[in-house]
Amino acid sequence: MSVQPSWPIARKLTLFLAAMVALLALVSWAMVTSFAREAAGRTQDNILAASATSIAETLRSEAGQIRLELPYSAFSMLGAISEDRVFYRVSAGSDLLTGYADLEGPDVATGDVAFDTMPFRGTTVRAVSVRRTVLSDGRVVPITVTLAQTRSGVQGIAAGLSRQAALLSGVVFLLAVGIAAYAVRASLKPLNTMAQHVATRGPSDLRPLRRQGPPELMPLVRALNRLMERLGGSLRRSEDFIAEAAHRVRTPLAVVRTQAEIALHSVEEEGQKQTLRRVIRAVDESSRSASQLLDHAMVSLRADDLARDRVDLPALAGNVADALRPTAEMKDIDIAVDAMPAAALGDAILIQNALRNVLDNAIKYSPAETVVRLSVQNGGGEARIEVRDQGPGFGDESAAHLTERFRRGEQVEGIVGSGLGLTIADEALAAHGGRLELNDNTGRPGACVSLILPAA
């Protein structure tokens, strides 16, 4: 069952912070809009009250009559807010002195100021009433001044402030989201750096993580280090098992083959001899297959965590030739070594495995009483080990096919083999940044296999 990935943490955090910022921006816009409307309304009320008071102060009594001179300044103050329509009414008791007879203002006590928002002549107005008393012919006459103004201007001012608040909130929102996204990425950068550091490692690079990070990541680092320690122990046990298995498998097979050969020389019946020859051939095939399978497993384990030691190639070639010389002598094959100084950085065990499999193939496919030539060369930044034999060669098979696992050439019928020798050599060289070249000998029978490595 595959695990479906969830949303990235960075996206989740960014969206969460963006939602919080949007909510705060909306609340701040609503608050600014409310304050703007309240401030505009208070401004209108203050101007209305000042204008009404200014009109009321001009009232006086002359010869028993209430006189009124509407001051221009009272209406100019109202015009300072906007171009809204203004209505007024001045009454002495129940008598209308001037203004709109149908304008009814809010009830007000003497000496007080009262406000009200109400409909008037098909529109909404803000009205103020001011009451004072005037002494006329020895009697006290209550005077009421009512002023009303439409609210379009005040609403326009409030709407303008609201739009500016919305624009400011939008800008703040975008800036805050950008800052939040940057902050989230910066906060997650140590995690991404650690992930990249782990991703660039080879499968067998199980060194503990030493990178410093935020305290929140340290439990993850410790858990990864414990996991890699357990995996390292498992790989070491696997490598030890392969080495032990190689020894355990080869030794009894060698004993069986020896006993079969002794029995072959001691029997005289032809049928028994054929049976023993088939046994010897089966043991050889099993021994070779088991040996190369174990070699291939060893290459796979060590390829991703190569040792980087300086390898003396002439010495390594000489050791491999000496180890296989008894096998070659059984077919009267001579191994001629011609080595010039050369070195490479790498894993000596893998290079030795590669060369041993190539040289073993050369001995196996060469006819009796021939020479297998092993040479080591150095030049052009490359170290080259060549193995030339006098066998049937590769024919028309391409190098890419011959290095496939369990793939054998066309001219190997009747010869024991597993099809892993060239695969092991190719993978070991590829792990070192080198390559394997396969060619037939020019103008004469046999094959030439070149193991090429970067020179040290």
Image (cartoon, rainbow, N blue to C red):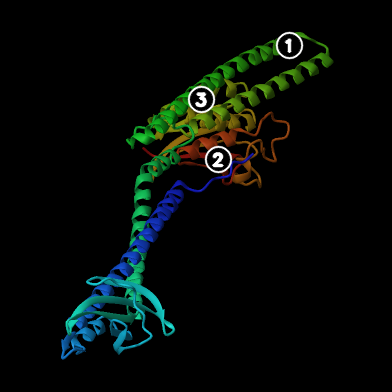
Residue at image coords 45%, 46%: 9
Instruction: Please state which of residues 118 and 442 is positioned toward the viewer in this rendering.
Output: 118
Mark 3 vs mark 1: give the one in front.
Answer: 3
Q: Is residue 147 above or below residue 259?
A: below
Instruction: Please state which of residues 79 and 25 is positioned toward the viewer in this rendering.
Output: 79
* Quarter of the rendering occupied by the N terminus: top right
Q: Amino acid at mark 3?
A: Leu
Q: Does residue 56 appear to the left or right of 40 in the view shown?
A: left
Q: Amino acid at mark 1?
A: His
**Element type where label 2 sits in the image:** strand
**Element type where label 1 sits in the image:** helix
Q: How many marks?
A: 3
Q: Is residue 111 above or below residue 137?
A: above
> Marks 1/2: CA distance?
37 Å
User: Which residue reaches farthest top?
Assistant: 266
Going from N to C along the chain, the mark reached first, 3 or 1, is 3
Q: Amino acid at mark 2?
A: Cys
Q: Does residue 372 appear to the left or right of 277 in the view shown?
A: left
Q: Does residue 181 appear to the left or right of 401 in the view shown?
A: left
Residue at image coords 65%, 26%: 289
Instruction: Please state which of residues 391 and 164 is positioned toward the viewer in this rendering.
Output: 164
